[in-house]
Amino acid sequence: MNIPLNIDWQQILLHLFNFSLLAGGLYLLLYRPVKRFMDEREAHYRAAKDEAETLTAQAEKLRSEYGEKLAAAEADIARRISEADLELEQYRAQEVEKARQEADKIITRARENALRERAEIIAEAKKDLTEAAAAAAEKIALGDAGDPYEQFLSLVERGSGDEPAK
Amino acid sequence: MEKTRRNRFLLLWLCVSAALLAGSLALPDAGHSESIGAAMRDAVLHETNKISLFGLMDVNPSLISAMSVTAVLLIAALLIRVLVIPRFTYVPGRLQLLLEQAVGTFRGMARENSPRRCGFLGAYIFAAAAYIFFGTLFELFGFQAVTTQGHSMALPAPLADINAAIMLGVLSYFVIVSGAIAGHGIRGIGGALKEISLLLSLSLRLFGALLSGLLVTELVYYYSALSYALPVVVAVLFTLLHALIQSYVLTMLTSLFYGELHGEE
């Protein structure tokens, strides 16, 4: 059969055979190895990405946990500070009360001491006044003669001078 | 110093070019073994100039071109497989980047059009694109072959032969049909038959595009007056554009219809 345009089935099949050789060869020698390498690299980077995402998620989880722990610790610290403040306040009040009681004791004791000393001073003053009064009275009673003993002694001395010779 | 060297190079280059031009004009024309009509008819139909395939049969020159391209590509692929691919690193160099870009482009095209079933499609369009691209560039080299009639002729692009274009077009259609069957079973054949025009359009699109380039080149080279400077644009740039455009068009259409008939949205 004479086909127009010189179409030749045998040559079409030869071209097909040639192309199948080329396609198969290119697939085995070029396309598949390059594709496999690209897949491997993609898998490598995907694994790295997944690992990074996992690590990021873990880090995020840890951060969240630590955040919660931090918040709990801060709450605990705040509670403890509050308790400590309360205790401090109570302690301060106790100490103030104790100091006040101590001060009261000291004041009482001082007051007692003062009273006692006052009494002693007054007693001593009375005694001094008494002595002074006695001395004054004596002085008034005796006049300028002075002490009688002294007067006796003076007379004795004076008499021995005036006695006649025997 | 640098400027002097450049001027010397320019002078030498102009002298050599002028000498070659004078020589080619001075020498007597060897004459054409066939008329322009016959040459262009033969470029389309390949009725006259046949080449013996290892003494087994006479075939169109495009088949020899196709086999040469296949041999070169397979040797290059083998060398790359042995020498380059084992040294691939996660941070690619230039050659690795080129290879990955080539594979990744067609793999991505297949995945984009047929996400559920893209392995075979990617491999097929990669091979088809390589065949079209390098096959088209092959004609740039102008490798000579001796026909059975004893004439010397430049080997054309494989797809400048309608038999090669029909092969690739029909094969692409059957790949699309296989996608339809894989997606919908026997019912998929019905859907594929609705697109039966693809058989013709894919084949003739390839053949027409490649043939037009071949005819223009053939025409230009037939007349020696047109053989200066013009081929730089006509042959090189047009061939490069052909290679890129036809590779892209066939692979894009194949993957598009494959995905559509396979049942992808």
Image (cartoon, coloured by chain):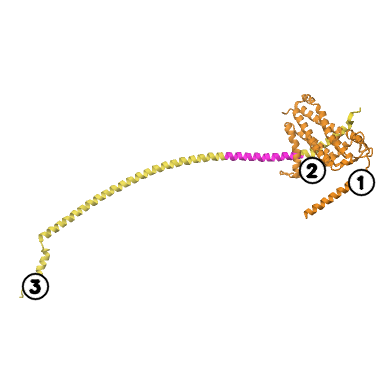
Specify few, some or many for label 1: CA neighbours under 10 Å numbering under 14, 14-19, or 20 or more.
few
In the figure, B9 relative to A153: above or below? Answer: above
**Residue B80's mark?**
2
User: Chain in orange?
Assistant: B
Q: Residue furthest bottom?
A: A166
Query: What chain is the yellow one?
Result: A
Sequence-wise, the earlier of marks 2 and 1 is 1
Chain letter, disc 1 residue: B
How crowded pointer 3 is (Cα within 10 Å; few <14, some 14-19, many 20+) is rated as few
Residue A153 magenta: no
Q: Disc 3 marks which residue?
A: A161
In the rendered image, residue B113, in percent from the top left (x then y), is placed at 74, 31
* Residue type, numbered disc 2: Ile
According to the image, label 1 marks what residue?
B26
The span picked out in magenta is A33-62
- Mark 3 vs mark 2: tell me if same chain: no
Q: Secondary structure at mark 3?
A: helix
Relative to B229, is B252 above or below? above
Q: Position of residue B239 (x, y in %)?
A: 82, 38
State the image quarter where residue A15 is shown.
Answer: top right
